[in-house]
């Protein structure tokens, strides 16, 4: 992971403006870059997803889709709270929609994390809980990321209450949720309580 020290000298606003204007991967993307992030220096909860999907690319609003509806249910909060950057930061592993492959969206492009992630996370000093969603986020954020998303999620108590590894809330994972009912029964009540406590 390269840390770009030049970024440390920017103000928070300058850094975020630079991220939103990033076109590093223009040649690799199937469309114009449109980085989608939400953050403020006062954010208390950090949500780390994979990369924006097509619908998010079109609207510029993170998790503005069925995955987002499920994620908000998991957290026990409404849209207004979810999109309040002063309380909730949303920083996916890839900031732009990577395009679609045969089995859904392509993986996040690694340049985002390599270029921006360390500098952005260094500014988020008020974070009390990080939701780490899906395999790419797990690989980056969990010190001992296991072989599968399921194994990481099963080990959730290891990271709690600072971090919570979760599967992706996508409808594509409905079978996983049916097979792993313990996630909804055990983990979500704890998550909702913690979110309420932090945002209270």
Image (cartoon, grey):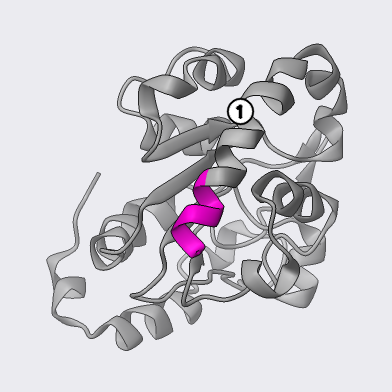
Q: Is residue 90 visible?
A: no
Q: Is residue 177 magenta?
A: no
Horizontal side of 126 relative to 63 (left or right) equals: left
Q: Give the image quarter of residue 187.
A: top right
Q: Is residue 199 magenta?
A: yes
- Residue that label 1 marks: 187
Looking at the picture, does residue 87 appear above or below residue 50?
below
* Highlighted magenta segment, given as a residue range: 194-200
Q: Nearer the viewer, residue 36 or 70?
A: 70
Q: Main secondary structure of the magenta part?
A: helix
Q: Nearer the viewer, residue 85 or 136?
A: 85
Quadrant position of the N terminus in the picture: top left
Query: Percent x, y for residue 149?
Result: 58, 21
User: For the point 51% across and 75% down, which residue is it?
Assistant: 85
User: For the point 56% across and 44% down, which residue is it?
Assistant: 193
Horizontal side of 88 relative to 56 (left or right) equals: left
Query: Percent x, y for residue 196?
Result: 55, 55
User: For the point 49% across and 79% down, which residue is it?
Assistant: 20
């Amino acid at each position: 992971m390269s840390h770009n020290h030049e970024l440390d000298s920017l103000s928070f606003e300058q850094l975020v403006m630079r991220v939103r204007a990033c076109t590093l991967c223009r040649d690799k993307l199937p469309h114009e870059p449109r980085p989608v992030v939400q953050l403020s220096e006062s954010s208390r909860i950090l949500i780390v997803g994979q990369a924006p999907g097509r619908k998010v690319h079109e609207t510029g609003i993170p998790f503005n889709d069925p995955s987002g509806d499920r994620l908000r249910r998991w957290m026990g909060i409404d849209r207004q709270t979810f999109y309040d950057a002063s309380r909730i930061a949303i920083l996916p592993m890839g900031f732009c929609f990577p395009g679609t492959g045969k089995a859904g969206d392509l993986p996040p492009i690694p340049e985002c994390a390599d270029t921006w992630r360390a500098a952005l996370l260094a500014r988020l000093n008020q974070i009390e809980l990080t939701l780490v969603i899906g395999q790419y986020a797990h690989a980056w954020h969990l010190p001992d990321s296991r072989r599968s998303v399921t194994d990481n999620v099963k080990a959730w108590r290891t990271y709690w209450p600072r971090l919570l590894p979760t599967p992706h809330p996508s409808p594509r994972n409905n079978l996983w949720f049916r097979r792993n009912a313990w996630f909804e029964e055990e983990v979500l009540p704890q998550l909702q309580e913690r979110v309420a406590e932090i945002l209270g």
